[in-house]
Image (tube, rainbow, N blue to C red):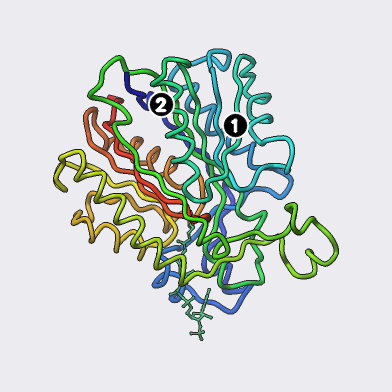
Amino acid sequence: MRAIISGVGHYVPDKILSNSDLEKMVDTDDEWITSRTGIKERRILDKEKGTSYMATKAAQVVLEETRTSPEELDLILLATVTPDMPVPSAVSFVQRDLGASNSWGFDINGGCTGFMCALTTGTQFIESGRHQKVLVIGADKMSAITNYEDRTTCVLFGDAAGAVLLESSGKDDLGIQDFIMHLDGAGAESLTIAGGGSIYPASHETVDKKMHYIYQDGKTVFKHAVVGMADVSAKIVERNNLGDNDIRFFIPHQANYRIIDAAAKKIGLDPERVVININKYGNTTAATIPLAMSETYRSNKLQKGDWVVLAAFGAGFTWGSVLLRWALD
Ligand code: UT7
């Protein structure tokens, strides 16, 4: 019994932060940002709203389009690195606001690989027969942890949410077919938010030292991301006896256009099969893959039976790939 994606949706805030806006805030320019990252603009959520607001909006699209009532949900998994608060889980607010009164749920912190961690976890609950309807959401309000005085990070991130509904297919040839997931804590210090946890609880000192903002050693992450994403993508295609031409779409995490390009080249995919929307949204962490999947589906490019590869790399280091056969008409 396979888990299929029976619905997909997304939400992005209206407010746009463009490269020219950023030129007025830090010492940067459109040429540098575009050539180094591929990003032109990103979306920013209102200050007073949290990640759960976007997650709930994306989930509502999925429930509406699949004609699923919130009470039918068995489980909600929310991948995020920006929960509304440290406690409770952000999914608690989503479950409440959706009215999903029969569902349990939890947050998953898998960095930029978070959506895939949640997707593969949800898949297990469907495949085991334990649950019938699992909602998987990737959502991040990166603007809440971005230092808009640091040009090395503030040009990269944006806010968004994406969601999918997982159900049982009853057929083995559709849905999530395979996944490869990795964690290597040797890279733990390369991408962090050091403050606000149990080692450095919030204090005047952590605020003064800007420890509540995202920090990354961009070059180190870049190098590992290119190799990691290419390796797991090639491996999942090979071990399922597929050729590059069998893959209709490669939907990668959107951290940097150059990382995506290098990974796609390594696995020999022509650009027409690679989904890229980083130009519009920047890096929205756990939301990039479901957002890109939702946009691709809405542009009528995905057909039932299409082979799709998802791949991501992020904090941890975490990385992985998922192979699926599209199940929606
Ligand atoms: O999603 C989670 C995983 N994250 C990633 O995958 C991100 C991986 N890393 C990257 O995408 C890239 O490393 C960055 C986009 C973050 C940086 O690009 P880069 O080509 O590695 O640039 P760099 O860090 O080597 O910086 C090159 C130069 C530096 O100046 P100097 O030292 O050569 O004089 C930076 O200070 O560019 C400078 N720089 C900027 N200049 C203008 C850094 N940020 C900016 C900026 N505008 N925004």
Q: Residue at x 71, y 50 (%)?
A: 47
- Pointer 1 local density, CA inside 10 Å: few below 14, some 14–19, many at least 20: many
Q: Which residue is rendered at x = 16% and y = 48% of the image? A: 244
Examine the rendered structure and indicate whether residue 25 appears above or below residue 170. Answer: below
Q: Quadrant of the N terminus?
A: top left
Q: In the image, what residue type sits under mark 1? A: Thr
Left or right of residue 189: residue 46: right
Which residue carries the number 2 mark? 7
Q: Where does residue 248 sit, x and y in percent of width and height?
A: 21, 42
Q: Quadrant of the C terminus?
A: top left
What residue is rendered at 44% in x and 42% in y? 291
Question: Which residue lies under the disc numbered 1?
Answer: 56
Indicate the amino acid at tag 2.
Gly
**Furthest-right residue in view?**
204
Q: Do callouts 2 and 1 mark residues in contact (Cβ within 8 Å)?
A: no
Residue 230 location, quadrant = bottom left
* Residue 23 vs residue 162, the one in the foreground: 162
